[in-house]
């Protein structure tokens, strides 16, 4: 009998960003003098803001004394952070949540990867294409692949708006503002998805990791701004890009009490309890220091400082968008998201243009095809560089022939 | 069709410690004046040691400046920590590991819960009984329950040594020093398990979370001290009890390169790569601050400070053991582990004695039956209290009639 979960063997051998890192390392080994600028992986460059740093020092000091020491916290997060989220993020947008609908975790990647444990092995999942690889790979590891995965193409031809399916899909992953394309859905477009889900008894897994970068006031920050979403959607949030927490590790997931799903014998099971059970069994809470750090984002100073850093990155995005367009490139995103999605010049596949930029401009982008078949012929740039490195990269791209 | 993973519905509705917390809350609500002492859940009470606190402040300061800021780290951990583990924990015990056999995670609970993703759905797992509930529940969530789970009783009658099975078991969970019984296996006994695994092509999942509490120099700290273990065992480590990291969240898992498992068509698949793929897909690394904190444990000051704290808890354990035995109780563990496992007085089930202690001594223990059927008739005490609270709890137990 097999001892191995053979689903793993059907996965592509490496994770996209590991492939990129290997290519860059190999190039660096041959050209140690090359000053390589990464606009590839979505990691931030600006330090944590002062309010967060102060909170982390304070929390560390608490851990130094028996009177204020904190051991195991609640698996699903401290109330101080859950309350700060309810009052500062959701209430101002007219969304009412109770704190036990909010689950603090160590980042959106873990939660978006683990959430599929709650659903039946045989479910059909739908993903936009291109797509954040975690949604597909985490399902593949659990045996949902092939006919169980429906790809919904998003490209320039359909203005990056996935078409509402004409078949039944059980679970739909939506990420808006989108990674990798940087595009958004309007409230009306999102309402169509919620209506589809309610009609089909489907679940929407809504990844809002990039909501802080929305500048257009008409674009929803949360799917719960849409009527009916509490009955059909789980939402994922990240502090990684919002507040530079890529190395701090904190995020949260919302599973509303109204959300339930059906069993084989037609009982309705609330998913909030299932996720709580999953987290209490296979997770032991997020670092106390990271939770205090996240709480500090919601103080008046924290809010102002975080806004400033996001503004810094969006200045990059606008600069990149203007420059690349002035060079005649076809570029999407970058207005409500830290990602730009550029069609490769004629004759270049995604990986060919990646190589071209690496070799001739010493700039690292992400090949669009790494995010799915509909990403072929595109590359992704991130706006998370410094002003200086971004300007330098753009100057080098300008000097290229293509 | 079912949308829900119905395996979740077969689980008992709550996690053991949540049940206990509810009982204690209910009692407190009725008796707000009661000064309740918890010797129940295994959380620590002593603060983080100075070397760790300093490292956390330093790491926080690094995050405050663009020059030293750390964003995404390697998913499987920073080399500085992996190297510290190899050189300080394993080499002195004669165990050679390469750093890519070590995977830094956010704690042993996550890793022991997630590791079963690597194995085939139909595998038969073996657990000692009583058992840390995570092993069983994480498998139940994945559909391994009923006939796919073999319980190996450990009780006073077999001196808490699980019998080598006379049938084939694919995956065996062993935790030594044991949670909950506080008992240990000798090198010879452990060798028998390794030999069984090699003979049967089984995998041993070895939870070494409590190794730091071993006082007897002949007891192995790692299964890799046993010949052949690198071919059949994965080992889990925690900093939670070792260094008070229950709120800091850091641990690590070892998957040796020699360890492989078979597919249905008899190929051998190295599990190191599978676990790496799992972690790179569904986890985004452990907090940088937590990893620097863990590194500090391996400095000369850190080692000394951590040893002192462990000594503090083991003083509690010895005091508890002596007192409870002097009262005529039958008590196990507590010599190489922070847990004591006590047979309940005649006429008391585990939960009855739990209630008796809570109501009449205001002391919280953990009912043994919560860890499995063979735990019925026992309760667990932990040595993680302060000297003062432990002494007070013992005094109250002395004054009880039973």
Image: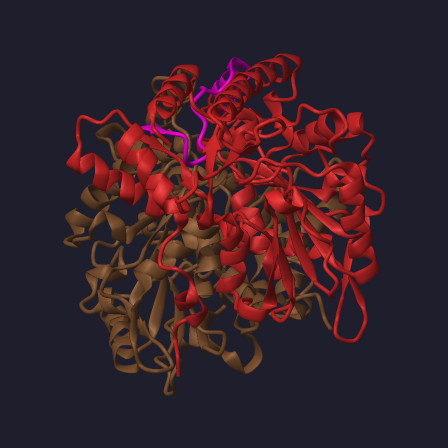
Chain colours: A brown, B red
Q: Quadrant of the C terminus of chain A?
A: bottom right
Q: Residue at x 80, y 48 (%)?
A: B192
Q: Nearer the viewer, residue B276 or B90?
A: B90
Horizontal relation, residue A328 to residue B154: left or right: left
Percent coordinates x, y for residue A364 in the rendering:
61, 49
Horizontal relation, residue B215 to residue B67: left or right: right
Please give the range of residues in magenta.
B37-59
Q: Residue at x 53, y 16 (%)?
A: B312
Relative to A137, say whether B226 is above or below: above
Q: Is residue A145 visible?
A: yes
Relative to B338, say whether A129 is above or below: below
Horizontal relation, residue A244 to residue B218: left or right: left
Percent coordinates x, y for residue B322 in the rendering:
53, 21
Residue A334: image quadrant is: bottom left
Q: Nearer the viewer, residue A300 or B126?
A: B126
- Residue B55: say if magenta: yes
């Amino acid at each position: 009998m097999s001892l191995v979960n053979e689903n793993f063997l059907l996965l592509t051998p490496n994770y996209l960003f590991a492939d990129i890192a290997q290519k860059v390392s190999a190039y660096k080994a041959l050209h140690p003098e090359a000053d390589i600028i990464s606009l590839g992986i979505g990691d931030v460059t600006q330090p944590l803001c002062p309010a967060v740093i102060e909170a982390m020092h304070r929390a560390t000091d608490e851990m130094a004394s028996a009177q204020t020491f904190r051991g195991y916290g609640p698996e699903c997060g401290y109330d101080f952070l859950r309350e700060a989220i309810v009052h500062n993020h959701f209430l101002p947008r007219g969304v009412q949540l109770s704190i036990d609908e909010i689950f603090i975790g160590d980042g959106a990647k873990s939660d978006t990867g683990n959430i599929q444990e709650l659903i039946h092995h045989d479910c059909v999942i739908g993903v936009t294409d291109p797509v954040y690889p975690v949604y597909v790979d985490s399902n593949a590891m659990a045996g949902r692949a092939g006919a169980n995965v429906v790809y919904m193409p998003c490209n320039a031809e359909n203005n990056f708006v996935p078409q509402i399916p004409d078949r039944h899909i059980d679970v739909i992953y939506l990420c808006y503002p989108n990674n990798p394309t940087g595009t958004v859905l309007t409230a009306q477009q999102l309402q169509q998805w919620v209506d589809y889900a309610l009609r089909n008894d489907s679940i929407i897994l809504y990844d809002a990791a990039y909501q802080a970068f929305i500048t257009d006031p008409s674009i929803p920050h949360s799917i719960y701004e849409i009527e009916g979403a509490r009955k059909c959607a789980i939402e994922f949030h990240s502090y990684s890009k919002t507040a530079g927490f890529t190395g701090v590790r904190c995020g949260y997931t919302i599973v509303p009490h109204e959300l339930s799903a059906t069993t084989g014998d037609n009982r309705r099971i609330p998913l909030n309890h299932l996720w709580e059970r999953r987290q209490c069994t296979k997770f032991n809470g997020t670092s106390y220091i990271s939770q205090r750090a996240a709480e500090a984002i919601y103080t008046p100073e924290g809010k102002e400082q975080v806004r400033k850093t996001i503004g810094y990155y969006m200045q990059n995005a606008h600069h990149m968008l203007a420059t690349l367009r002035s060079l005649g490139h076809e570029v999407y995103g970058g207005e409500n998201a830290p990602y730009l999605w550029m069609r490769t010049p004629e004759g270049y596949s995604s990986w060919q243009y990646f190589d071209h930029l690496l070799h001739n401009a010493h700039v690292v982008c992400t090949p669009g095809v790494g995010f799915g078949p509909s990403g072929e012929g595109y590359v992704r740039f991130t706006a998370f560089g410094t002003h200086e490195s971004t300007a330098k990269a753009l100057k080098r791209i300008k000097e290229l022939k293509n």
